[in-house]
Structures are given as structure tokens and as C-alpha cells.
Image (cartoon, coloured by chain):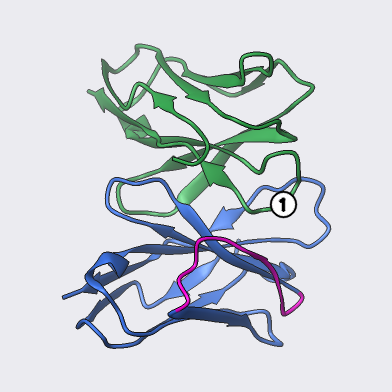
Chain colours: A blue, B green
Amino acid sequence: AAGVIQSPRHLIKEKRETATLKCYPIPRHDTVYWYQQGPGQDPQFLISFYEKMQSDKGSIPDRFSAQQFSDYHSELNMSSLELGDSALYFCASRPGGSGANVLTFGAGSRLTVL
Amino acid sequence: SQQGEEDPQALSIQEGENATMNCSYKTSINNLQWYRQNSGRGLVHLILIRSNEREKHSGRLRVTLDTSKKSSSLLITASRAADTASYFCATSGSSNTGKLIFGQGTTLQVKP
């Protein structure tokens, strides 16, 4: 079965650079969520999209932005990177209108900021 | 964590033993979920228990929920080395959104 695809899997950037992470949800899943997980931490919700519109916002820095495209894939753009942005970034998806809020997570993108 | 605590933070057992992890949360909930994460990998949904349920089973997993104490426990019976992972509880409060708040997680090591 198709899963949530994230790219790149690993990314190394310098401070103040920009980075873009991509997420391809499971087919027919129209809701996408982004989470950030620092070393040894629990995942923290960043932002979500439903039918290409932002549906909820969490602890996402102003330096970060995201969008969902017409094919439902989503991109997380991070600018002016800081050392503290080093983390695992997960994308998750679920079908819109699903009775249960169970998420399917991708394998994550590991961002290292030097 | 914004949601609560999980205990123990780390657990080491022998293969075949049972593992129990506990989770506490702070708000009223619609349901509570448990996810598993292998080191540096994505989270995998294990089981969901609704707020009006007290116990749920799935294979070797048993989850309990006590809404009066705002706590849940995950029991893994007859553990295997492959169960080695971190386990997180998560809720979305009283809503049914995918904006999950995770507990701090319990790292389980099962020794062969």
C-alpha cells in the first residue's frame, strides 16, 4: 500500500540558509499535517492543511511557511535557519471527513543545521 | 510536553516479559491514541481508545483509559526484541482533528 512520502530524507544546511521539505500524502488523503521532533523530544504540531487551505496552526515559527498544492502534496519552507531548527520533520495525512483522527506518518526528513 | 507525562521514560525488559507504559493528559478528550516510533523513523499508529471506552485489545496490545484520572496505560504482552521502540500517547483534546498533542514517550528496550 502507498504510504506518505517525504523528501529529502536527510538535509544539511548552514545557518541563515533556506530549506524546503516535501510531502506526498497517501492517495485520496486530502488533509496533511506537519510535525517537528527535536532530539529526544515528542513531536510538536506545526501546521495542517485541508483541501489546500490552512486548517490549523501550531508552534510554527514565522520563518517557516507551508502550503498544499492542487495535487495535495505539501511543502514546508524554512528560511533563516537556526541551529535549533535541527530536528526530524514529519508529515502525516488522513482522509478528510474520516471518523477517526488516526494519522499516517511519513518516515520523516532529518534536517541538520550547522 | 504540553499534554502530560509518560512513565516510565525508559523501560528495559527481557523477551517474553510484559511491558506497561503509562500516560497522563491534562484536558478532556475525544479519544486517546498510542503510536510507536522506531529510532529516528516515522510514527506508526497502534491503537485508539475512545473516551467512552475503558479497555481495548489489539493482538498483544491492551490499552486502558481512566478519564477520571486522565490517564491511560499500554500493556504489551509477551514482548519481543522487535518491540524495541519508543511509544507515545497522543490526544487532540475534545476535538477530532489530527492536531495531536503527544506525551513525552517511553523508550522500551526488549533484550533477546
Question: Where A66 falls versus A48 (above or below)?
Answer: below
Question: Which residue reaches farthest front?
Answer: A62
**Residue A17 in picture, x, y percent from top left:** 28, 88
Question: Where A31 falls versus B36 (above or below)?
Answer: below
**Residue B68 in picture, x, y percent from top left:** 68, 14
Q: Is residue A73 left or right of residue B97?
A: left
Q: Is residue A43 left or right of residue A11?
A: right
Q: Is residue A92 magenta?
A: no
Image quadrant in which the N terminus of chain B is located: top left
Q: For residue B55, say whether it is visible.
A: yes
Q: Is residue A57 magenta?
A: yes
What amino acid is found at the position of numbered circle 1 in the picture? Thr
Q: For residue B61, say whether it is visible.
A: no
Count of labels in the image: 1
Q: Is residue B66 left or right of residue A63?
A: right
**Residue A108 in picture, x, y percent from top left:** 41, 64
What's the residue at 71%, 34% (across, down)? B31
Q: Which residue is mark 1?
A: B97
**Residue B36 in picture, x, y percent from top left:** 45, 40
**In this picture, which residue range is highlighted in magenta?**
A51-62
